[in-house]
Image (cartoon, rainbow, N blue to C red):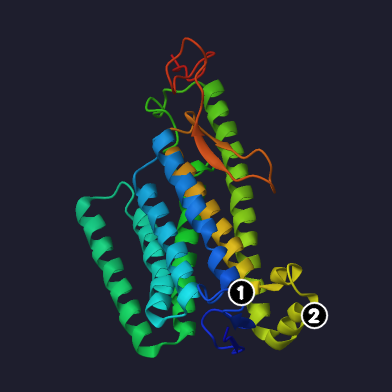
Amino acid sequence: MQTSSRCTPDASTHCVIQDYWLTPVSAEITNTLTNLLFVVLSLLGARSCLRNNHDRIFLVTFAGYAAVGCGSFLFHSTLKYPMQLVDELSMIYTTCISCYSSFTYKRSRVYALAVALALSGLAVFITGYYHYLQDPTFHQRMYALLTATVLFRGFYVMESNLRPGRAVRASKPPFDKPGLLSPMERARLDARDRAILNRMWSMVFYGLTVFLGGFAIWQLDNVYCGTIRRWRREIGLPWGILLEGHGWWHLMTGTGAYFYIVWGIWLRHCMNGKADEYELVWPRLLLSLPEVQLKRSPPGTRRGEIVDGEAKKAK
């Protein structure tokens, strides 16, 4: 079986990979298979959306998330330029969907249409200019800019809508209007929102750490190309696979992106005034994935109903 190896620090994906080293079916078997994480997590996320009645925009987001994994799967299997475009541009398009969801929430149709047209134009520009340049640095910078925009927008929305003492929060029951809440109920809502904020920031920190850790490993994989390839040959199979830095980039960025989507789902429910109806289920920090679920209603109550004297109006 004929093989080839590449070690170019400017490569758009990685270096230190020997093509078709295991099978003629896939050029880079490790980098191909690690993309299955995107498919699995997108299916889990879509099932959660349907089971827990999350906003439909997140079904679209998970579809885009799956498209990123499928595009990367096809590229690393074939190393064909069209598949590289599918791989990298799907990241741009999915992030544009997240931008649209974040900036158009509860805005007018005219505003939402304007944002959609602007983001579509931006996506077309990035596609055409990237195809013209064929410079991975341009793609990476555009993706980083879009991702940072979505993240900081989310931070602002989270703090401004949940932090007690800030602007009027949307994460309250419909009857929460000025002068209608007792001091006890307002204290309960403030304590609830502080607890939600703490868990959200923990999830954001964990997801960002994993995501940026994957990016750092990928960069080390490029910088120390020859050294890592030599180490992997000396170690041999199966443990040498653990030195596939680009594979770790797939696994870690896929996990970090999943955390971001779940965070967005929870934040959206809080902004919809349903913070008492949903909860974050995250049993173990390192060994489980978070999921936003509908709370189980106690026997004799309706789903989402507040019990035990909560949410009383002030006389």
Please tell me which residue lies in front, 192 or 48. 48
Quarter of the figure that contains the N terminus: bottom right
Circle on res. 152:
none
Label 2: few (<14), some (14–19) or many (≥20) C-alpha neighbours in 10 Å: few
Residue at (46% x, 74% y) in the render: 75
Q: Secondary structure at mark 2?
A: helix
Please tell me which residue lies in front, 213 or 83. 83
Of labels 2 and 1, the one closer to you: 1
In this figure, which residue is indicated by the disc labeled 1?
Answer: 22
In this figure, which residue is indicated by the disc labeled 2?
Answer: 234
Residue sitting farthest toward the left: 110
Q: Amino acid at mark 2?
A: Glu
Q: Is residue 164 visible?
A: no
Q: Amino acid at mark 1?
A: Leu
Measured as percent of width and height from the top left, residue 4 is found at 58, 88
Please tell me which residue lies in front, 62 or 205. 62
Measured as percent of width and height from the top left, residue 192 is found at 57, 32
- Is the residue 68 above or below the residue 229 in the image? above
Measured as percent of width and height from the top left, residue 236 is found at 76, 75
Q: CA distance from mark 2 to mark 1?
A: 17 Å
Q: Secondary structure at mark 1?
A: loop
Q: In the image, is 71 to the left or to the right of 191? A: left
Of marks 2 and 1, which one's residue comes earlier in the chain?
A: 1
Residue sitting farthest toward the right: 234
Q: Is residue 178 visible?
A: yes
Residue at (66% x, 73% y) in the render: 244
- Is the residue 138 above or below the residue 266 in the image? below
